[in-house]
Image: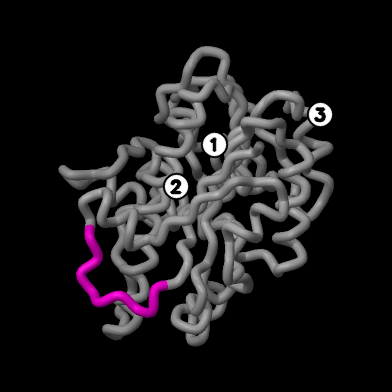
Amino acid sequence: MWATAVGVARVRALETEREDALFRDPLAQAFAAAGGLWPSSPPPEDEAARRRRLAVSFSIVIRTKFLDDLLLQASASGVRQVVLLGAGMDSRAFRTDWPDGTRLFEVDTAAPLDFKASVLRQEGVVARCERITVAVDLREDWPGALAAAGHDPTVPTAWIAEGLLIYLPQDAVELLLARISAQSAAGSRMGLTLGSRGVIERFGADAVPGSAASMWVSEMPDDPVGWLAGHGWEAHSRTLRECATAYGRPISTPPREERPGGLIAALRR
């Protein structure tokens, strides 16, 4: 699945080139190039496939901005521990102005972390915080590995699960959230992206085997705020359309039936 993370990097590289970019990710192009996706053009596709690809790319841009803002707010509140679950090609350790004393843990399997390390060496970049990589499969005892790497569950943590939960079956989603909650002191923050209701039907039903959409299995609950409240989190839910409008990128197509949003910011009480 880490090849999907390289595809996400390509989307971020394209956004970075825009004059009105919502964020700048200087490493994204290097990750995409090392993965064979830069420069490149999408293969020939019909109009429906093109629309789906553009919709997914747009959602990646909006969610990146949403979670960037969440992490800045967490830092401003005094949080100095950040955990990126399924970190992939995330470069926030290098592109965010972190306060002194920030420790950022990147949790992922060895293959993407090794690939990423080779690109970082090639680029000669230095993290703007204490960056700690934790090579572990999220289906295994990742809390133990995180603790061994120095994570302190007695102080607040900002958790990010970006583009991750949609790939996990529902029981694995519940286990992941239970484990996050068990490691979260009061004042912890959490940013989640959830697959909106119907997204698998719209994007995954005829997805090309091996593509990202072909591996989507989990959509968000009908009441994500209530679901997270049951785990001890005070959550706020935003739709992609709401955030896009707020960021000056309004969606021009007519809205479908309004459903709860898939961009979640939560606070541990």
Chain-order first, disc 1 or disc 3: 1
Q: Residue at x 78, y 56 (%)?
A: 175
User: What is the crowding at mark 3: few (fewer than 14 residues within 10 Å), some, or many (at least 20)?
Assistant: few
Q: Are marks 2 and 1 in contact (CB under 8 Å)?
A: yes
| Marking on residue 34 | 2
* Residue carrying label 1: 118
In the image, taking residue 55 as reference, residue 252 lies left or right, namely left
Front residue of 261 and 170: 261
**Which is nearer the eye, 239 or 14?**
239
Label 2 sits on what residue type?
A: Ala
Given the image, on which type of amino acid does mark 1 rest?
A: Ser
Q: Which stretch appears magenta?
A: 250-258
Tell me how the rendering is colored. one colour
Along the viewing direction, whichever of 1 and 253 lies nearer the viewer? 253
Tell me which corner region of the image, top left, top right, bottom left or bottom right, holds residue 29.
top left
Q: Kindly identify which numbered label has been placed on residue 45.
A: none
Of the numbered discs in the image, which one, if any, rests on residue 148? 3
Magenta span contains residue 189: no
Classify 132 as above or below 232.
above
Residue that appears at 64% across and 46% down: 233
- The structure residue drawn at horizontal position 45% and vertical position 43%, both measured from the top left corner, is 67
Task: Give how far apart the Cα atoms at labels 1 and 3 are.
Answer: 24 Å
Helix, strand or loop under label 3: helix
Quadrant position of residue 107: top right
Label 1: element kind: helix
Mark toward the start of the polypeptide (3 vs 2): 2
Q: Which of marks 1 and 3 is in front?
A: 3
Say whether disc 2 or disc 1 marks the residue closer to the N-terminus: 2
Q: Is 254 colored magenta in this rendering?
A: yes
